[in-house]
Amino acid sequence: MGIVPNKSKECIFCKIIQGTLPSRKAFENEHVFAFWDIAPQAPVHILIVPKHHVDDVLDVRPDQGILFQQLFLAAQQIAGQLEIAGSGFRLVFNSGDHACQTIHHLHLHLLGGAQMGGSMVG
């Protein structure tokens, strides 16, 4: 599946991708795996992760730029399948401790299914 072996031994998301930890799968293709968050912050809260382990958004190399395209294309497809594309949704990357990144495997949060609150307006 293209997972970096030295990181995948301890990474929870790598274990989910490998199937050694359970998850509620929302989407999968050759590049990404998406699953429902176990502590949802919205009625729809999907985590979209690359199958290849990358610790953080800051660790994506220039030659890996297609990784973001793959994550966003998966988000578009999932939002359409879950019928939240028309009403709107939020996409979030967390990077580092101050952003509350708790799992160090690059992941994109897809949140929707209700009116979003908070200070993100504009």
Image (spheres, grey):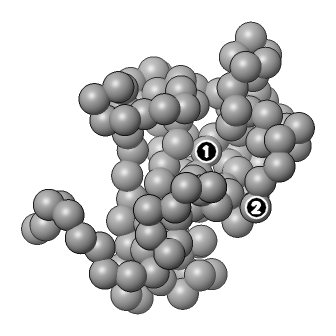
Q: In the rendered image, which quarter contains the N terminus?
A: top right
User: In the image shown, does 18 or 68 lie closer to the viewer?
Assistant: 18
Q: Quadrant of residue 80?
A: bottom right
Q: What's the CA distance linking mark 1 and mark 2? A: 14 Å
Q: Residue at x 52, y 72 (%)?
A: 44
Tell me: residue 6, above or below residue 79: above
Count of labels in the image? 2
Residues at marks 1 and 2 touching, judged by CB atoms closer than 8 Å? no
Tell me: residue 17, above or below residue 36: above
Q: Secondary structure at mark 1?
A: strand
Q: Position of residue 4 (x, y in %)?
A: 73, 19
Residue 24: assigned label: 2
**Residue at the disc numbered 1:** 49
Q: Is residue 20 visible?
A: yes
Q: Quadrant of residue 16?
A: top right
Q: Residue at x 37, y 52 (%)?
A: 92
Q: If you read the primary sequence from the N terminus, does the residue marked by circle 1 or circle 2 appear first?
A: 2
User: In the image shown, does 96 or 85 lie closer to the viewer?
Assistant: 96
Mark 1 or 2: the one toward you: 2
Q: Position of residue 15 (x, y in %)?
A: 79, 34
Tell me: residue 107, above or below residue 91: above
Say left or right for 108 vs 20: left
Tell me: residue 82, above or below residue 41: below
Specify the amino acid type for callout 2: Arg
Q: Position of residue 75 (x, y in %)?
A: 53, 63
User: In the image shown, does 30 or 112 lie closer to the viewer?
Assistant: 112
Specify the amino acid type for callout 1: Val
- Please rate how many residues cluster around mark 2, counting C-alpha atoms within 10 Å: few if below 14, some from 14 to 19, many from 20: few
Q: Residue at x 61, y 45 (%)?
A: 49
